């Protein structure tokens, strides 16, 4: 399921804004096919760096014995609610270094809330239903978004400075499912090729 790109925008000085320009990133597999649901983050160097700001409500629902959405992007400090819409109880947990927590058994129409105060990838599971899994990407950069069906994200106001680009995807063959590279100030269109595990392969929660 593809949702609209999530971009976090805060105020920026006129000097930095004058140097901003669209940055397009296309993520593909080794055969050139687009990779959807990859989370791309740009970390500009120096004063151009800026943190995201929480806006709106962040929800990971339990419905039809699934977490929805499968991949969420939230800023550091966000409160995420976990409503249960299933006729059975759930026991949500994560062992991820970015956020370890446990929401013990709660029933239909009940909800719990967790604050995510550290950047990183948080893998979710249910202690009752082993087939349930999802990911929350907690970001500390205002330039973070998820690839669309064409494997593309566009940051319209990315600073034209040297920076670091990271790409995460649940099935990416790399430590923690993450690859990164340094990009120059003049690079405005990038193509990042990644290797993926088969989609049906089981995810190992401890990898995150």
Image (tube, rainbow, N blue to C red):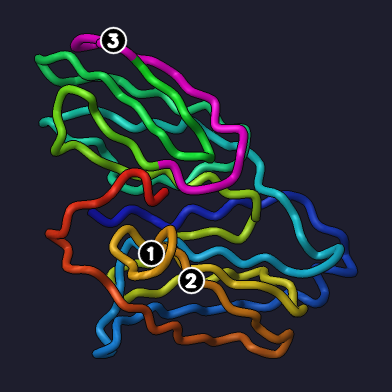
Image point 71% across, 74% down: which residue? 163
Of callouts 3 and 1, the N-terminal one: 1
Is 208 displayed left or right of 143 in the figure?
left
| Mark 3 and mark 2: Cα distance apart in space | 37 Å
Q: Which residue is mark 2?
A: 179
As rendered, which of 115 and 8 lies closer to the eye? 115
| Mark 3 and mark 1: Cα distance apart in space | 31 Å
Q: Position of residue 187 (x, y in %)?
A: 64, 88
**Which element is circle 1 on?**
loop
The magenta-colored residue range is: 104-122
As rendered, which of 120 and 81 lies closer to the eye? 120
Q: Residue furthest front?
A: 206
Q: Position of residue 145 (x, y in %)?
A: 49, 60
Please tell me how crowded label 2 is: few (under 14), some (14-19), or many (20+) other residues with Cα within 10 Å.
some
The image quarter in which residue 183 lies: bottom right
Q: Which residue is mark 1?
A: 38
Q: Which one is closest to the eye, mark 3 or mark 2?
A: 2
Can you say whether 67 is above or below 185 in the image? above
Q: Position of residue 66 (x, y in %)?
A: 17, 35
Image point 28% across, 29% down: which residue? 61
Image point 66% across, 47% down: which residue? 52
Residue 205 falls within the magenta-colored stretch: no
Q: Which residue is mark 3?
A: 110
**Which element is circle 2 on?**
strand
Image point 14% across, 38% down: which residue? 131
For the residues bearing labels 3 and 1, Cβ distance under 8 angstroms: no
Please tell me how crowded label 1 is: few (under 14), some (14-19), or many (20+) other residues with Cα within 10 Å.
many
Please tell me how crowded label 3 is: few (under 14), some (14-19), or many (20+) other residues with Cα within 10 Å.
few
The image quarter in which residue 14 lies: bottom right
């Amino acid at each position: 399921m593809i949702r609209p790109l999530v971009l976090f925008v805060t105020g920026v000085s006129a000097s930095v804004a004058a140097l901003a320009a669209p940055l397009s990133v296309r993520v593909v597999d080794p055969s050139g096919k687009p990779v959807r649901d990859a989370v791309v983050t740009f970390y500009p160097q120096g004063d151009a760096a800026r943190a995201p700001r929480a806006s709106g409500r962040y929800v990971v629902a339990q419905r039809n014995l699934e977490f929805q959405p499968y991949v969420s992007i939230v800023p550091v400090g966000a409160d995420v609610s976990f409503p249960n819409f299933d006729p059975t109880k759930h026991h949500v947990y994560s062992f991820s270094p970015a956020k370890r927590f446990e929401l013990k058994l709660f029933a239909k129409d009940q909800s719990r809330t967790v604050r995510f105060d550290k950047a990183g990838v948080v893998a979710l599971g249910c202690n009752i239903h082993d087939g349930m899994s999802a990911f929350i990407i907690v970001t500390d950069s205002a330039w973070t978004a998820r690839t669309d069906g064409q494997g593309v994200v566009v940051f319209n106001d990315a600073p034209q400075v040297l920076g670091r680009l990271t790409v995460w995807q649940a099935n990416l063959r790399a430590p923690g499912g993450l690859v990164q590279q340094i990009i120059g100030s003049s690079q405005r269109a990038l193509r990042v090729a990644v290797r993926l595990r088969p989609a049906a392969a089981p995810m190992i929660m401890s990898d995150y």
